[in-house]
Amino acid sequence: MKRGYQDNYSQRMEGAVFDRERRERKAETIRAVLQDFLKNDLSSMPLLDVGSAAGFIDNYLADHFAKVVGLDIDQEAVNFAQKSFQKKNLAFKVADGMEIPFPDNEFNIVLCTHIYEHVPDAQVLMKEISRVLKPGGICYFAAGNRLSLMEPHYRLPFLSLIPRRLAHVYIKLIGKGDYYHEKHLTLPGLKKLVKNFRITDYTKQIVEDPQKFYADYMLRPGTVKHGIARFIVQYVYWLCPSYIWILQKPGNSP
């Protein structure tokens, strides 16, 4: 089977896609990181979300940005978003992240949160994101690491680590699918993927001060989990299960 898009993702992963509380908390973190990086008013800026799913994140962000557009290939998820969230500055479209239906230099900000592993060609995705960003524009890039003991989509240990042929067999035997679509990269692979952008790393900042970035629902200060996360980002950064970077397109910021 040739790797393509996973059909009916929102139905297969319903628990994650339609978890409103968790999605809105992620939106708070996104807004806080963008505010910290840009240091100015967000309300004049248009934002594009590539892989908007059911629209919870975009609905939240529409209260803070001039315009928010969510794109996703999942018709069911986009239908849900269009019916559930109606604001003058908010729109949802069925579209492919590898063929973004907007002209060059259209957006100040693009979101790409845990999307690269789902598309057939992540390099094409990043080229499209760069194309629609204005010179100096930024991409909020959240990316999973292949070197994770627990695969985040299927909650199966070692799934992303083993050879892909075995991964297909693994999820089939467990009864979670017939084909492992997701294709994660290691830290060097991620850096190569985004080599045409300037990277500002927020992973360490968020781990060190989760309350500032509204991430304390995942990392409660003083807990064992928080202590382990601090150790990982400090000493074995290449083993972080996920990274949050701001990617800036070359050029003068508008």
Image (cartoon, rainbow, N blue to C red):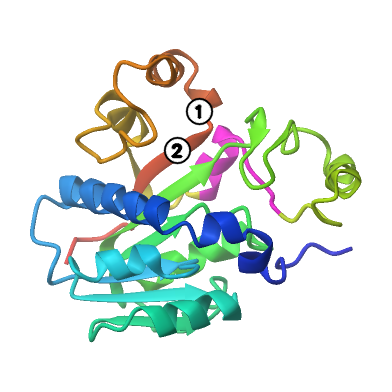
The reply to whether the magenta stretch includes residue 184 is yes
Disc 1 to disc 2, how far (Cα)? 7 Å
User: Magenta span covers which residues?
Assistant: 182-193
Residue 207, visible in the rendered structure: yes
Contact, mark 1 vs mark 2 (Cβ under 8 Å): yes
Residue 102's quadrant in the figure? bottom left
Q: Mark 1 packing: few (<14 Cα in 10 Å), some, or many (20+)? A: many
Q: Find residue 56 and report its horizontal and vertical position in percent.
A: 38, 65
Q: Nearer the viewer, residue 15 or 209?
A: 15
Residue at mark 2: 243
Badge 2 amino acid? Tyr
Tell me which residue sits at (32%, 55%) in the image. Answer: 27
Q: Amino acid at mark 1?
A: Cys
Secondary structure state at the residue bearing disc 2: strand
Q: In the rendering, at what x and y percent does residue 170 appear?
A: 86, 41
Residue tagged by mark 1?
Answer: 240
